Image (tube, grey):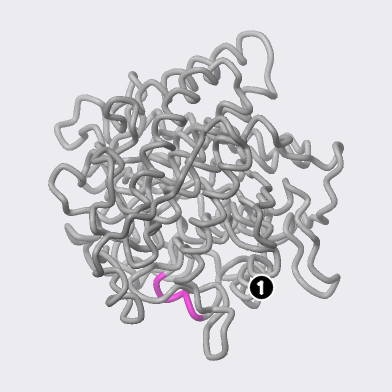
Amino acid sequence: MKGLSRLPALAGALFAAQSAMAIQLDITNVNSIQTAASTIAHGMMFYYTGNQTGGTPGLLPAPYYWWEAGAMFGMCTQDVVSQALLFQTGPDADFMPPNQTKSEGNDDQGFWGMAAMSAAEVKFPNPSPSQPQWLALAQAVFNSQALRWDNTSCAGGLKWQIFTFNTGYNYKNSISNGCFFNLAARLGYYTKNQTYLDWAEREWEWVESVGLISPIYQVRKCDVEPGKLPTPSSPAIHPLSLPYPPPTNPTLLRATQTTGATQATWEARVRGLLTATSVFFQNNIMFEVACEPSNNCDTDQQSFKAYLSRWMVASSKVAPFVADLVALQLQTSAKAAAASCSGGNDGVTCGTKWTVGAWDNTWGVGQQMNALEVIQGLLIDSVPGPVSNTTGGISVGNPAAGTGGDTNPGAPTGRISTGDRAGAGILTAGILVALLGGAWYVFSIIPPSPVLFRLLSRMLGSSRVGDTE
């Protein structure tokens, strides 16, 4: 994927000498946390022009991809979020807009579906009756992807790409299947429809069976020969060292819905997955193990700490047995993140590396997202959990949504390139921690400025499962 963002309008300011200003953060003081989050969020939204004349609602400028825009809208004001989400729903209200379908994959669609699910879970204001509703949008994404479940290779799973004309159509990866698992678990919790939960179980079993998650809960990247199933002993399978945790969000949520032996199984999975994230911490400070040591983090990698923060915090909310570990790493990382937000002309621009104790002369949407997520995560104890249709949920669903479009068109063309493999592989490890962590993650904070930030949950991650060409 593409490299560090250097928007022309910011170039002069961001190359300027670092000022004496910096984000001031007292992790024990709510007002301090809110003020820091507000400052960082303001810097993040400076990059978004979709709500301005001539802009396209829901899109970030190059080099940011569509999925990252979806992730960012978990940290915006209500009117901006609603405008962006609804503008990108597409003619069939399934997040397949014409301006994206030429390159859209199941993972891309999944990120936006999870955003809509989050809106339903936090009782986000409903759109007008003439517009698609949040729950129905999430159901549309799930249903359209369930129809794409492919038993012709690897004994199941979702392919990375939706359309045959995109390179990688025959590739099955963790991120796409992680998003699907996420939606299934969360829809099951919200609607109490057992069918969704059955799909979540089916997805988890498939991911394990093909070796995407190892016996010690490492998320793996797998490249397999046509028609062959990856196995843990295959030399083509190796641990995926990326700044993303394995599936935790929906899985933790699933764990809270079970009892007895089943609950014990999910608890063990949650603990294992969170333990496996230790590779992403240095002295309890989060870092991008795949790219920070070599100073070559691409645009996508520059936002990965945001998702790991979000999912770990969500996990601690849903599964208190991991709260102590998460709190230690979150608090240490939040202080380090605040120290990194000391660059640019404004003195509060955030950088990529939190382990250096200062700004590292990088900037962008991802850097702001990272700091915002980990700092806002300090407020998790003061917010309620997700609602369902029996505990105050107000979003209207449509169980048949998403079943009428072209869900799996055409036949595969072209071979997947090394670059394509690298891009998809880097996203999947993280969605899996989120999946097990608790199918939601949201905060509402009202900082001193008149801005209401609603954090909508988004499970991301990416690692690839297998090329079945």
Q: Which residues are magenta?
A: 99-103
Task: Report whether residue 221 is seen.
Answer: no
Q: Position of residue 316 (x, y in %)?
A: 57, 26
The residue lying at 73 percent from left, 35 percent from top is: 384
Question: Which image quarter holds the N terminus?
Answer: bottom left
In the depicted structure, whether residue 276 falls above or below residue 451? above
Residue closer to the observer: 286 or 410: 286
Would you say 314 lies left or right of 21 here? right
**Would you identify the image quadrant in which residue 33 lies?**
top right
The residue most toward the front is 20
Quadrant where the C terminus sits is bottom left
Query: x, y percentage for residue 346?
Result: 39, 65
Query: Pointer 1: what residue?
Result: 83
Q: Position of residue 323 (x, y in %)?
A: 54, 21
Mark 1 secondary-structure assignment: helix
The x, y position of residue 69, in whole percent, is 48, 65
Considering depth in this image, is 155 or 124 the residue closer to the camera? 124
Q: Would residue 185 be found to the left or right of residue 62 on screen? A: right
Residue 131 falls within the magenta-colored stretch: no
Residue at the location (62% across, 40% down)?
440
Is the residue 292 above or below the residue 344 in the image? above
Q: Chief secondary structure of the magenta span? A: loop
